């Protein structure tokens, strides 16, 4: 346990030092832009999922997300000249796993609640991270506890589309993942 706190403290120090290397004006500008982009992405995805839920319930919404979530994010990438992704230690889609050391280290820091968002430099690109939480009761229809929040039909659809699904078992307000916005260096 003490080792985890030590690792978090060391990484927090490294994160703070990385923050200092980024020009303050650029840091402020891209942090604001990252926050705006994640708010838009979250709103667009939630609106589309809500519509899918109204159309055909949770089973339809799971299928909708499987087919359409990536293309929605891709259109936002083009509109904002960045690369938007979602990453998680408990991912549903295999592409959303924690890929880089920065992803893994930041996961630990966000999970501990030490930061609300951050911008770091990775391979000369600036990358903004912000937590994703299970913010609404409707989220639990697909990300909650199987058997109580997630009905049998939805659970079967999830297993069919995502046989290695890790993105269940959440409660309202739980930390579920990270938005990751990569700004390419000019």
Image (tube, rainbow, N blue to C red):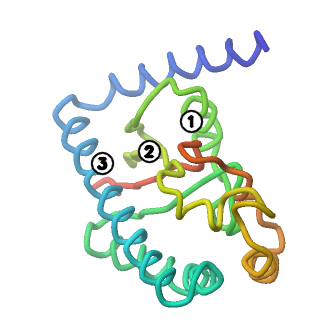
Which circle's residue, 1 or 3, is located before the other in the chain? 3
Instruction: Please rate how many residues cluster around mark 3, counting C-alpha atoms within 10 Å: few if below 14, some from 14 to 19, many from 20.
Output: some
Please tell me whether mark 3 sits on a helix, a strand or a loop: helix
Foreground of the two, 49 or 11: 49
Residue 149, picture quadrant:
bottom right
Disc 2 from disc 3: Cα separation: 9 Å
Number of the label disc, if any, that sits on residue 35: 3
| Residue that label 1 marks | 106
* Residue at image mark 2: 129
Taking the image as shown, residue 182 lies to the left or right of residue 35, namely right
Q: Where is residue 49 in the image (x, y as percent from the top left)?
A: 47, 76
Label 1: state its secondary structure. helix
Q: Residue visible at 47% across and 83% down?
A: 54
Q: Nearer the viewer, mark 1 or mark 3?
A: 3
Where residue 129 appears, x then y in whole percent? 44, 44
> Where's the C terminus, which quadrant?
bottom left
Residue 4 place in picture, x, y as percent = 73, 19
Front one among 43 and 80 = 43
Q: Residue 45: where, in percent of width, then height?
A: 42, 71
Residue at far left of view: 25
Mark carried by residue 28: none
User: Which residue is depicted at the point 40% across and 55% down?
Assistant: 182
Asked if the residues shown at circle 2 and circle 1 are in contact, with their CB atoms under 8 angstroms apart, the answer is yes
Residue shown at 60%/38% (left/top)? 107
How far is the residue under mark 1 from the one under mark 3? 17 Å
């Amino acid at each position: 346990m003490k080792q985890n706190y030590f690792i978090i403290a060391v990484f927090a120090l490294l994160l703070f030092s990385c923050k200092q290397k980024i020009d303050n004006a650029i840091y402020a500008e891209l942090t604001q832009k990252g926050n705006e982009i994640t708010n838009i992405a979250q709103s667009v995805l939630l609106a589309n999922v809500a519509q899918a839920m109204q159309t055909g319930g949770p089973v339809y919404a799971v299928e909708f997300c499987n087919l359409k979530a990536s293309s929605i994010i891709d259109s936002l990438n083009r509109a904002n000249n960045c690369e938007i992704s979602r990453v998680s230690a408990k991912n549903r889609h295999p592409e959303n796993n924690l890929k880089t050391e920065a992803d893994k280290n930041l996961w630990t820091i966000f999970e501990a609640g030490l930061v609300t968002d951050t911008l770091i430099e990775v391979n000369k690109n600036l990358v903004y991270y912000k937590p994703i939480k299970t913010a609404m009761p409707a989220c639990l229809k697909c990300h909650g506890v199987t058997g109580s929040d997630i009905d049998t039909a939805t659970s079967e659809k999830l297993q069919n589309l995502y046989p290695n699904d890790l993105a269940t078992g959440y409660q309202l307000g739980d930390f579920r993942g990270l938005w990751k916005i990569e700004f390419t260096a000019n």
